[in-house]
Image: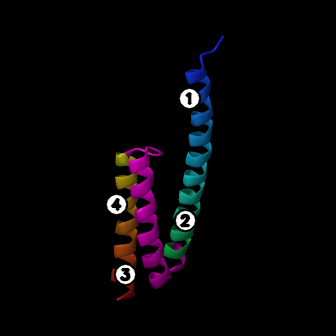
Amino acid sequence: MHRPSAKKHARADKAKQIRNRHRKATLRTVLKQTETALEEGNVDQAQELCKTVTSLLDRAASKGVIKKGTANRQKSRLTRKLHTLTAAAA
């Protein structure tokens, strides 16, 4: 009953779902690691993780995994926390 193109789209959608799930899981893991580093006061580790998170958020937003505004909001909140931590450490 289904057309071959519909079956192909279903296969492609399943592959995209798996890929997007992996990207989101990786993003959440690194976000949690960054939050932990910020709470513990590890400035160097937090800065490195913040760079990684920024890259992952931008990539996820460009691929359509998350919305661009969501990525910008999360980056803004992380950098704000990082700046307050570095100001307190200085």
Element class at badge 4 = helix
Classify the position of the C terminus by image quarter: bottom left
For marks 3 and 4 on the same chain, the one whose residue lies earlier in the sequence = 4
Q: Marks 3 and 1: in contact by CB < 8 Å?
A: no
Disc 3 versus disc 4: nearer the observer: 4
Circle 2 is placed at which residue position? 30
Locate residue 1 relative to residue 88 in the image: left or right: right
Q: Which region shows up in magenta?
A: 39-67
Q: Residue 88's x, y, as percent? A: 37, 82
Circle 4 is placed at which residue position? 76
The residues bearing labels 2 and 3 have C-alpha atoms spaced at a distance of: 20 Å
Disc 1 versus disc 2: nearer the observer: 1
Q: Marks 2 and 4: in contact by CB < 8 Å?
A: no
Question: Measuring 42% from the left and 56% from the top, which residue is drawn there?
Answer: 59
Q: Does residue 5 sit above or below 35 in this rendering?
A: above
Circle 1 is placed at which residue position? 9
Disc 2 versus disc 3: nearer the observer: 2
User: Which of the 4 image quarters holds residue 55?
Assistant: bottom left
**Amino acid type, residue under disc 1 in the picture:** His
For marks 2 and 3 on the same chain, the one whose residue lies earlier in the sequence = 2
Locate residue 9 relative to residue 60 in the image: left or right: right
Element class at badge 2 = helix
For marks 4 and 1 on the same chain, the one whose residue lies earlier in the sequence = 1
Q: Residue 4's x, y, as percent? A: 60, 21
Classify the position of the N terminus by image quarter: top right
